[in-house]
Image (cartoon, coloured by chain):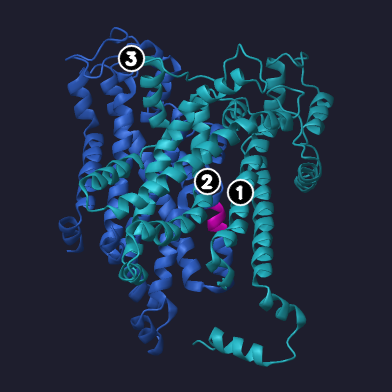
Amino acid sequence: MVLINLWKESGKFKLGMVITLFLLVAAALNQVLLRWAVGPDVDPMTAGSFGIFLDPQRDHLLGTDRFGRDVFSLVVIALPVSLTVAFLAGAMSTAIGVVMGFFSGFVGGLTDSILRTFTDMFIVIPTLPLIIILAANTRNLGSVKLALFLAAFSWPAAARVIRSQVLSLRERPYIELSRMTNLSNREIIVGDILPNMAPYVAIGFAQASVGSAFALVGLTVLGIGPSGQMDLGRIISEALGYGVISLGKEWIFIAPVALLILLFLGLALISQGMEEFFNPRLRTQT
Amino acid sequence: MSTQLPATTLETIATDASDQPGDRRFLRNNPMVGYYSRRLGLYLITLWGSLTATFFFFRFLPGDPISGIIAQLQTRGQYSNLEQSDAMIEHYRREFGLDGSMWEQYQRYFERIVLHFDFGPSVLSYPTPATDLIVRAIPWTLGLIGVATLLGWFIGVIAGTLVAWKRDTRIAEWITNVCLVLSHIPAYFVALVLIIFLAYRFNLLPANGAYNTTLQPSWSLDFIFSVIKYGTLPVLATVIGAVANWLIGTRALVVSILGEDFLTYANAKGLSPRRILMSYVLRNAWLPQIAALGLALGSVVSGNVLIERLFRYPGVGNLLVDSVVIKDVNTAMAVVAMLIFLVLTINLIIDLCLPLFDPRVKTSKS
């Protein structure tokens, strides 16, 4: 019900959803796309399947790279890997953010001050160097581990959104009413606060996913990604590694760059659309 | 539920009591002293906390760093004895500050960096101290970030104010939408586009290094021009996204200011639109954006690591990646500590300068 209204009222949300769904569907159909692009017998990662540096053409929509691999099929298998890590990291950092923000906002007092100082510190200091060091020093870096590292540094955004919302909810008259009727803290949290938090958790999730995806791209363009798997950033870093720009073969990394920009844009539009919808004061401003 | 008295009541009581302690009266008469000392205290605590976290972060990385260090020194021909005798390992352990218990190492780490600004030897160019590598690299990074941040902020805030002021025109709407998209594109991708077109296709600007390597670093005019020429693309890559970001933020801020009563009043007084824009709107817009400048710095520094890598710019970001690749713990730790110190200190300076620009900070209680 709320979702339908949101869809109808917010152009930003609608556009963001269309972009994100397009990426998700493309990622889900990767086997189908792969079969269509190179047939069932070719492993896209195997070198020498085709001629090297072929220009984009009918059989190779995005051409081939230095190792004679079809770039389109590389992109097809890389997209789900990048999306999985970004959304997994987004979900994990939302979980951390919800716990931190909720605790901070609901308990208040000294706990709140300490947690807020801690959160602010994480927002102020540059975290990408830390993620780079952590990821580079880990052997067998799988998607889950990588997502966990990203989440460990991108939760403050979600924590902030949740905390400010809890603070505002705590002062609402109906909470006061529940307190006067002697409901326990647990009942107030479950019955009154949590249902009203859902949209803000969603906003936090979108923001945390954007943050994680940003850091993920930073890592993978340096060549640090989930080991043994192709992801969008790795296509870019490999291509740069053998000097595609000086060779004039930039089309090899155009598709991964475009897909990643679409991901950032889609998620950012979703979170902005939701923020404006659930916080009408923002809507009048823009 | 709430047994606390409202703050105003407490205050009245405190003012009425003639026997209030002298220090409290002093703080009341000089509210800025309280602001400065609180801000300074918070800075010291945050700095200590993040430097401590940095130390333990590096010590708890998987694997014993000493074996990696010795392996690296061997491959770099610094130490040809292939057999890692216990005495050798012990020697390097001591030299790299990795001997003794965790607590001893921690104490030594703090003593060294606070008193002597010493991070131990680097592996990258052993036995040069990591500090020397940092000191060599930091001016380049500061130059890059400083110019890009200030330029991006300045253009973004002014353009954002104008775009909000003229928000009904088609061109303002168009600029806003373009910037909305641009603000979500990482500086790294902007840099790729700039390199492809400006450096390779049209061959206008160099995209590799910080200056023409045939010149000797000096204060000669040739060298300075070369630095500017080589720095243009990396700065531009950061500036484009920064302008878009500040423009969007400032626009939202100004649009909310435009509805305020004091502007209606200023208008009714018959002030010229230019006067209203300059001394009523812009003044209210750029003050909050100064405070926001410090918060944005962390992500600028993060993004700059990638930019420096891409342009092979000899700053600390490039140094960091070089040191991470060969597991040079001391250098990587020095870079991280340095970046955190820089960001926190610039934030402190901004906060301490804020009362100079914004009279409201002086009177606010929090």
Quarter of the figure with the N terminus of chain A: bottom left
Front-lying residue, B364 or A259: B364
Q: Position of residue A158 (x, y in %)?
A: 42, 56
Up/down of B181 relative to A70, above or below: below
Q: Eyeballing the image, is B62 above or below B21?
A: above
Q: Are marks 2 and 3 in contact (CB under 8 Å)?
A: no
Query: Which label sits in the foreground, 2 or 3?
Result: 2
* Residue at image mark 2: B297
Instruction: Identify residue type, mark 1.
Output: Ile
Residue receiving disc 3: A249
Q: Is residue B365 left or right of residue B45?
A: left
**Left or right: where B61 falls relative to A161:** right
Look at the image and give the residue range highlighted in magenta: A118-122
Q: Residue at x 65, y 46 (%)?
A: B341
Single out the mark in the foreground, 3 or 1: 1
Q: x, y percentage for residue A82?
A: 36, 35
Q: Which residue: 50% across, 50% down?
A: B293
Residue at mark 3 shares a chain with residue at mark 1: no
| Kind of residue at badge 3 | Lys
- Label 1 sits on residue: B346
- Residue B61 badge: none
C-alpha separation, residue under disc 3 versus residue under disc 1: 42 Å
| Gap in angstroms between the C-alphas marked 2 and 3 | 35 Å
Determine contact: label 1, label 2, CB under 8 Å: yes
- On the rendered structure, is B61 left or right of A163? right
User: Taking the image as drawn, is residue A44 in sight?
Assistant: no
Seen from the viewer's position, the closer of residues B153 and B304 is B153
Q: Residue B316, can we see it?
A: yes
Q: Which chain's colour is blue?
A: A
Q: Chain of mark 2?
A: B
Q: Where is A138 relative to B296, above or below?
A: above
